Image: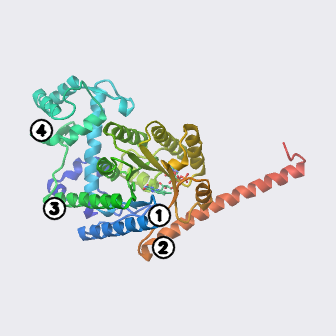
Amino acid sequence: LSSRTSAAEKEMGGAEQREKQYRAHQGFGDHHGGVTGAHTYFYTDEAKCDQHMETFLCCIDASSGSTEDGFSAIKLTALARPQFLVQFSEVLVKWRRFFLQLAAEQGQAGRAVLEIKLEVDKLQEALANLGILTKAESQEWFMSTSLGTGSTVDLLDWNSLFDSRTKISKPLLIPNRQTAQLEPLLSRFSEEEDLQMKRMLQRMDVLAKRAMEKGVRLMVDAEQSYFQPAISRLTVETQRCFNKNQAIIFNTYQCYLKEAYDNVTVDVELSRREGWHFGTKLVRGAYMEQERERAAQMGYEDPINPTYEKTNEMYHRCLDYVLEEIKHRRKASVMVASHNEDTVKFTMRRMMELGIHPSEKKVCFGQLLGMCDQITFPLGQAGFPVYKYVPYGPVNEVLPYLSRRAQENRGFMQRANRERDLLWKEVKRRLLTGNLFS
Ligand SMILES: Cc1cc2nc3c(=O)[nH]c(=O)nc-3n(C[C@H](O)[C@H](O)[C@H](O)COP(=O)(O)OP(=O)(O)OC[C@H]3O[C@@H](n4cnc5c(N)ncnc54)[C@H](O)[C@@H]3O)c2cc1C
């Protein structure tokens, strides 16, 4: 737990002011709790993070040596102090919520996030009324960015304002949702924490450069929702640098999240505007039980879709959006990382309808090693690029992971057996009643 509570925060007693979802919680200090579908890392010290980076480098080398067009996957919680990811996530979420609050004040509540356009005049007036910046200060700030001449601001412009916050001479304040008081958007990082953040960015940079050199695509796994805004943002930053000519860095979107479609569409739009290649792995999400339990215990809204069907809908909606992007721009690539047969069939059907040929390799499939070979092999034989996620590591860590996979497989076989038994029962019933074809 202590690795998730910053020194600066302890000093300032700041945890109380933090949004509930982004607070450290005693019961979830071990963020492995309740997670069966993914490996999780524990922060010990910076040397351990360096060691993880070396392992990831070996994995990139191994992938490049064994296959063309290979992938390597990394987890950012292995490369950084998780507390930094939690804190940065909180900042990003607050900044987006402030945008939505201002949109509501301009009568634009409920619009799709990319359709919200704040009028600059009204926005500057609101900032002045809230006591955040005078009109002259915000005009100067906006002029220092590409927004200088525009009359409206959308979410991507808003995010670029965040990036150029150092151009204003005072710390950025925003209203606290509970107290309505102004508070600094960025909590103070200690010098050591600042260094930890820099080292994490350096590690990502080293990995991305090696991946590029070796022609291996690097996938950044998605993790718990209280880390994910930061993980995703840092991945997008890496994509901006490395995906100029092709998709080398792949970001992961979890479609069990209520906000998945917004996240995908906003990042695709950013890639369009800036001209880089959008690379993504789409998954349903591995941390559902833990997420639900944490939300219930800490009293914030469950970030996960209410039902399995809603998650399926969300997956297909996000996937469809990316497939359309491939059709129209050819500057996107997607890994359909799923064991779900309907999703695989849906992808193949939409590819055919949109004229995306498997040999273009813009769409590939991914399954975990030892799972769903009955889907993987026919896909490969039919000419679709298909990958197996290979877990590796010390035996004592990998064996429990594999045994969980085996249990999942057993569940899958039980379902298949049950279905077969039911079919036999029905055939017998029809034979006995003489209604075989009714
Ligand atoms: C190659 C590969 C890479 C992966 N990488 C990641 C990763 O980076 N991050 C990550 O989080 N996961 C990752 N996963 C795991 C993935 O998110 C799923 O947990 C797993 O694949 C099962 O989902 P499915 O689509 O295969 O099949 P299904 O069995 O059809 O879907 C099960 C999933 O549906 C969702 N679900 C189930 N019940 C409900 C409910 N009641 N309400 C709402 N949603 C529900 C959950 O996400 C559950 O895992 C990866 C999986 C693969 C194959």
Q: Mark number for residue 406?
A: none
**Residue occupied by mark 1:** 67
Element under label 3? helix
In the image, what residue type sits under mark 3? Answer: Glu
In the image, what residue type sits under mark 4? Answer: Ile
Along the line of sight, the residue nearer the viewer: 278 or 177: 278
In the image, what residue type sits under mark 1? Answer: Thr
Q: Which residue is drawn at 29% across and 39% down?
A: 96
User: How many numbered marks appear?
Assistant: 4
Element under label 4? loop
Label 1 vs 3, first from the N-terminus = 1
Q: Where is residue 241 in the image (x, y as percent from the top left)?
A: 28, 49
**Does mark 4's beta carbon lie closer than 8 Å to ligand 1?**
no
Q: How many residues crowd mark 3 within 10 Å: few (<14), some (14–19), many (20+)?
A: few
**Residue occupied by mark 4:** 168
Q: How far apart are marks 4 and 1 (CA)?
A: 49 Å
**Residue occupied by mark 3:** 192
Label 2 vs 3, first from the N-terminus = 3
Q: How far apart are marks 3 and 4 (CA)?
A: 25 Å
Whether 219 is drawn above or below 98: the answer is below
Contact? badges 1 and 3 (CB < 8 Å):
no
Residue 132 showing in the rendered view: no
Q: Distance between the residues labelled 2 and 4?
A: 53 Å
Q: How many residues crowd mark 4 within 10 Å: few (<14), some (14–19), many (20+)?
A: some
Q: How many residues crowd mark 2 within 10 Å: few (<14), some (14–19), many (20+)?
A: some
In the image, what residue type sits under mark 2? Answer: Leu
Q: Distance between the residues labelled 1 and 3?
A: 40 Å
Along the line of sight, the residue nearer the viewer: 294 or 219: 219
**Residue occupied by mark 2:** 399
